[in-house]
Image (tube, grey):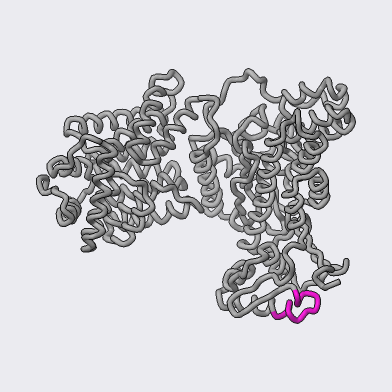
Amino acid sequence: MTSDALLQIQLLGSPAITRDGTPIEFPSRKSAALCLYLIANAGRHIERGHLAALLWGDHDAEAARGSLRKCLSLLRANDQTASLIGSDRGHAWFAGDPTRTDLATFNRCLGAGTERAYREASRLWRGLPLADFELGEALFDDWTARFRSDTVGVTHKCLAKRLDSMPEERAPISLQIAACELLITVEPSDSEANERLLRLLLKDGQKAAAARQFRVYVNALKELDLDPPAELVEEFRGALGGPEVDESLPLARAPNAPQRDRPSVALVRARPSQNVMPDLLSYAHSEVIHQLTRFRSMRCFERDDHDRGGQDTGLIARIGFTDALDHDYRLLLWDEPRARSIYLRCVNTRRQDTVSSTRIGYDRLEDRASAEAIIATAINSLEQDIITDDRPRLSGSPFERWLEAYQLLTQWSEASARQAMPILEDLALDPQGKRLSLVHSSISSLLMIRRLMIPTSAAMAKADQERAQATALKAVSIDALEPFNHIILGWTRMQANEHDTALLSFDDAMALNPYSASTVVAAAEAYAYAGNAAMASKLADKAASLTGRFIPPYYYTYFANIAYLSGDLDRCIEHLRRAPESIHTATLLVAAHAEREDMKAAAAARVRFERELRRAEPYAQSDGSTVSKWLVSTNMHRDPSVRQRMFGSLERAGMPVAAAR
């Protein structure tokens, strides 16, 4: 038997590496962390610089690399660990067999999809991967949090799809039970799996097992400070014989309760451990509530425990609610004493997967500005997830209909605008919809988009501008705390060449929500049009950092304008390659290439302009007078020389715009 055959690696639950049943002793906790990281990334050669920053982030680069070299030397010098790690001058990697980890075996069982494999996978799951293995190193601890959430999320999605593909009436009961039990092992509070398992156990005559499972489910919900839904309690009350269902359980909202018109977020605070100062957890909790209330597109709920036992938790904000499960997202706030951190985890309750996990160090919570920035950025990501969510819209609430139109609006094309406008105009006539300020500001936005995208007559352009400003003002009058309303009002003023008052609207929007990427990027372009290139670039960089891993395509239109106005033509063209195609971006592309004296590329861009023009207005003629007047009417630059610069570039590219100069 080879040495590798005797090696056992446990990543699920508390990590452990044993050889022939004897735990391997590592020279230090960081050397164990290095080994576990390489095992989790088995098959990849990891750059030394990345590993040094991951484990010695508080050192300068040279000192961190020195610490990594020392750590690798200690591992190679230890007979027990020497065979685990491979390295060269630039990289390190796991040198063992990556298939020998319990997580790899778990995944093979998951892939097999048999009853026996599911039962073996349930046995292997000892808890979240790398449980209780924080170092206090920010980058490493953030990685462990992502590794855990990704493992749970992928497993959960796989099992949920498997169960969806198993007809409850035709698939073998034992296979369905095994799959449900495995899913619940991974995510104990999953409502669909628990309810299905209860039905299957009762159908199979296992009443006692069903009663036990009901208690397990209720306890799992209590850990999250949630109650089982009323429908479930009523369904199983008689089947379980009554005594097994606690009559004192608070019941969920009645099925006929009014329909919600906005996505909701339920915030759950874990009970403080003895290791964390309760005031830090309370402060983080209240700051999350505060930031959630600033995002007007969401409704936030939290448990009101004041009436449960008479103990006041001392929270700044408190919103009671009775339906603990009927929400779109769940936020969990919990403490990790080893990492000296509090984590904010967001779960999409429809998909049952982790949207994000944010680490907030104790030291960062002691500084209000730092804590506010971290938490608000995390909430901004949550708002973006709601806005870009592709979930089926079944309720037809005013907010969901607006959201459909908004997603079309952000495609930044004439075709999508034509689809969105009827939805919004219907909402503006609806008794409930017309009270939603976002409806009116979105109509204003679409009118401006039409003005930017289609060369129209001066009379029509003026009518659209006047209506856009009127609807924007109406939106602000309905809800003056919604940043989007101020952004749209700012654009209407910018199009009317009222630059100073326009910037005041953008400043109002950023004051209301300084961590909204969409708010900041719009303000960035406005400052560019107003001639303040330095502020525009600063805000554009901030907007990019706030978006996280995903930058919406239409942001690149803003970035391209800012780059062009600041004279960075190469960057402008790079952004335009990622921006949605439109007449506006095509015109900018022609000008940028011509200004770089790349007439071949400018000619190709002009073909793109002609194509976009025909797509927007099939019967329009792009004669010089029409194009010139359209460019003048949609131009928002404070400095007339900028327009002259653009027109000169367009002329050199063969676009007859001289008539308006």
Quadrant of the image occupied by residue 618: top left
Nearer to us in this view, 287 or 28: 28
In this view, the residue farthest toward the right is 208
Q: Which quadrant of the rendered structure holds the N terminus? A: bottom right
Report x, y in % for residue 493: 27, 38
Instruction: Give the left or right position of residue 360, taking residue 530 as reference.
Output: right
- Identify which residue is drawn at 31% across, 50% down: 527
Instruction: Give the left or right position of residue 98, taking residue 570 as reference.
Output: right
Instruction: Give the left or right position of residue 629, taking residue 422 as reference.
Output: left
* Residue 285 within the magenta-colored segment of the rendering: no
- Identify which residue is drawn at 54% across, 25% down: 395
Report x, y in % for residue 253: 67, 23
Instruction: Give the left or right position of residue 644, taking residue 208 as reference.
Output: left
* Residue 82 within the magenta-colored segment of the rendering: yes
- Identify which residue is drawn at 73% across, 79% down: 76
The number of callouts visible is 0
Nearer to us in this view, 296 or 551: 551
Report x, y in % for residue 465: 25, 33
Report x, y in % for residue 515: 47, 47
The stretch of residues the image draws in magenta is 73-83
Up the image or down, 184 lies above or below 607; here it is above
From where the camera sits, is residue 183 visible?
A: yes
